[in-house]
Amino acid sequence: MFASQPPPPSTVNGVRPSDVAVISSIGLHMHRRLVEQAEDVSHDLQNNKGTDVDRDWKLVLLFVQVDRLCAVKQPQVQSVLQTVVEEVDDALQLLSSQLKRTIVSVALWDGEQHKTCMDANSEGEVRLLRTLLTQSLQESLGELLVKRRWYNDRDDFSVSLQDKPLFTVPVSSSGKHVSEAEATQQTDNLMMQMWTNLLQPTVGQHNTDDSGNIMTLPCPTEDRPFLRTEGNSPSNSPSDVSPLLLPFIGTEMPCEDFSPSASVPTSVHELRPADINGVAAVGDSLTAGNGIASNNILDVVRQYRGLSWSIGGDDNLTTVTTLPNILKYYNGNLTGFSVGMGKEQSPQAFLNQAVAGAKSKDIPSQVRTLVKMMKNDSRINFESDWKVITLFVGGNDICDHCYNSLLYSAENYVQSVRESLDYLHKQVPRALVNLVEPLHIIPLREMHMDPSLKCPTLLVEILCPCVILPKPNSKAFQMLDDINRIYQRSLQDLVESGRYDTRSDFTVVVQPFLRKIILPRLPDGRPDRSFFSADCFHLSQKAQTLFARSLWNNMLEPLGNKTSQQDFNADINLKCPTKTSPYIRTFNNSDYRYTPSPTPGPIKNWGSDFSCVDLVPSDTVPMSVNQLRPADIMVVAALGDSLTVGTGAKAKNFFNINKEYKGVSWSIGGDKDLETVTTLPNILRKFNPSLKGFSTDQGLPKQKGFNMAAAGAKTSDIPAQAQALIKAMREDKKVDFEKDWKLVTIFVGGNDLCHYCIDQNTLSPKNYSHNLKVGLDMLHKEVPRLLVNVVEIFEILPFKTVHGKSVACSLVPRTSCPCVINPIENSPELDEIKRINHEYQIEIQHLISGDRYEGKEDFAVVLQPFLHNSFIPHTGKGEADPSFFSVDCFHVSERAHAEMAIALWNNMLEPVGRKQSYNNFTYDRSKIHCPSQASPFVFTKINSLPRPPATLPPTSSPISTVPVPRCPSSLPVWVPVVAGFVGLLAGITAAYMLFSCRRKDKVQRGVEMKATNF
């Protein structure tokens, strides 16, 4: 139907995918100029005997890396940007002069994703800078191609610029090394993106459903069957019109009484504006001032801190409207505000410690830095001065929520804010904290739905995908609105708990003026772009002015009657203190009574609630491990070390720290029931009450079941444990060794890392993998009907942050784990342990990802990665939460065992390639997932593969992201080659993140093959 018939098309605008005979690439060599690579490709194509260079149509993919821009200082960006554009121009001119019948598709690529960019080190700021640089380069290349008329001066050659750069999605939002599964997911996404970019665009084309579960390869359509060129699919030319930004937007001060209190107040509830001596702020780019006065994309990287709504102090109120400039009318000696431009470390920033790209998890560190500065700066009398601190964060959390809903959950959001406020409450005297609710972000979407506004939507899709990408009225859209509102309510609940009103000189007040946003509009009804910076994402000075006025007015409005919407179309005037209400409003002077949410009672146990309905086994005992339901599992067992035997899990004093509480062990314990003790066996017993093998009570020998783990065990002990397990199961009369389905969980490696520095040869990563392989080989050879969970080794360095005052906390970690606990921070010894830790993870991934254990239908090994990116929960004091640890500060408590059990079970119900690779240790009795009707089995590598399109399950079921082709038979066989190129890109990216070094392998310059229809 779509296939072209010989002879091939004569014009470049009529080339279908199946007409292309040769595909080549330029730009994958890290250290060679583009023109040199273009010369090589041209030479290879002209000398390839299998190609008719004059007759065959060729596709050349030219990749342009963004990394070079990130590696320079900000003043050099413009010149380097011009150099990159000139290099692309040179390469394109060479190809145009030497090749016939060729389409060149230019694509930006974010390459190796270095951890720094233009001196930025924080994860969020690096992402922001990379995105802005990418957009600027995209626009510059677009301008070049318009200037060159797309090199389309003849019918057999054309250049197109791909609309969307190959920009990897932040699947590992923690900033740590991505897992092999995450790298695979990135490869799939990039392949889909590139293939879509190559085709003529179609209206309403989507690659994923609302749940992001399955991708379908888009196909050429009957009315748009060609590869994209400027001739058959004209692009929107870059706009040379920048939004009008007024250089100064001042405000008239209507107030008359600027007097302070008769004497310095001792109560925050009697604080007048003129009593305030200092201002400070923490937050993200909206407080850092990114792009406030920018009239081009590249300038958005600049931070205009002196114009920032809550903390800027440039000029005065008649020219620049900010909270400090309002307060200067009341106190000419006000200090703390930022001036001019610069980053948070610059002297001009002063007490504006906001960091571009920051999320809520970054605020505690900002707060600690801020407090340290206030204590040490002579301009601040830390004990006597009254201070107003504004905290505003949450937008970036919402922007990434759909990719990591647990990490950016409302619980984790409010936990970070609570930790920050707790620290301020403990450390800072005489302070009022403005806690500004996250803005209602959904109206921002409208800026990117009207093409006439010429907003750089691509940039915002990268910066804030979870806001821009969901389809209207979709499940993803509803989740976005829900989490936005929950974030807002959670701050109200936090403050109304009363925890920050325990003394008279400190309080926190929620300022809700951003709870509802009314978008600014032009007379014709379209959104008014002048309220936004050049990226249509950050705010211009017009919007910052309204923010400042609204914040001031909120501060003077009583609790219970505060303005809770920001109408950008309204003319907002400043309010003034009155004789009857001269104070900054607090709950006390507003005569407001908190209505806190009901305080939950004390946690009595670490059990879980269970909501699964379908608990039945298979109709007949399954023959294949790939059709194993939870209720089919008859026997559980475990191998490992002290974490599996439950050492010290319930210990209350020093004398019990070595006692083994096997009954609460996360992977094998069976004490009481699930409602009281959360373990994997207790979950499985809901499906099969006759389950055998679990441990009970405090681990007396006759009650240990098939828990073969031993305290202090290393990986070298696993073969012996495996042999002992096989023997025990064979001899147990309650076990039908041949017919019963068995589940074995293996978790080991902590003791190997703890003692690596003492015996590096024996405990090498290769030996770690080898010992596991020997144990798995035994199980594979001797045990029928077996599914093995191998739990990936955690990141061990966070254990250094666990501290306690007891003697056990001082001695046990140092003696039990000397190679991790004893080295000082940033020492070579610690760096070596970190490297070996990651090599352990890589080795285990390689062992299990291969086909070594795929020879038997009744056997499978599955890597469960929930500890791959592990972090330790912290309290409001910034310290590791002791409730997750035993009294020795080394072994984990029953609470941690329960969290690990939930994470393991949920991993088992997630398909390979889509498993959660981080822990989320937040208390919630309802976190246990359930098998679905569409996916009732425990996931293995085989049953994680996509199903035929004709029988796709409902979108709610967790299935693989491997793209499913649904195209007609004319789809050329070189489509997988495109996927191969993108695989190289994602492979390079993943390798960098996995190994923290440059890829040393040579990347093949081009791939060529004759097209064949199928």
Image: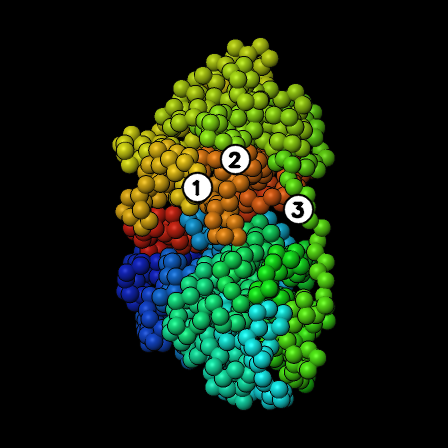
Q: Residue beneath label 2, please?
A: 893
Q: Amino acid at mark 1?
A: Lys
Q: Nearer the viewer, mark 2 or mark 3?
A: 2
Q: Nearer the viewer, residue 41 or 748?
A: 748
Residue in the picture at 58% in, 84% down: 259
Farthest residue, direction front: 263
Q: Residue at x 40, y 53 (%)?
A: 989
Judge whether residue 114 can be spotted in this image.
yes
From the viewer's perspective, tell me whether residue 700 is left or right of residue 924: left
What secondary structure is marked by label 2?
Answer: loop
Foreground pick, 712 / 225: 712
Residue 871: % across, % down: 47, 46
Q: Which secondary structure lies at badge 1?
A: loop
Question: Tag 3, which secondary structure?
Answer: loop
User: Is 826 rendered above or below residue 855?
Assistant: below
- Residue type of the residue flagged with mark 3: Ser
Q: Position of residue 607 (x, y in %)?
A: 63, 35
Decide: few, some or many residues near mark 2? Use Cα within 10 Å; few <14, some 14-19, many ≥20. Answer: many
Q: CA distance from mark 3 to mark 1?
A: 48 Å
Q: Which mark is residue 805?
A: 1
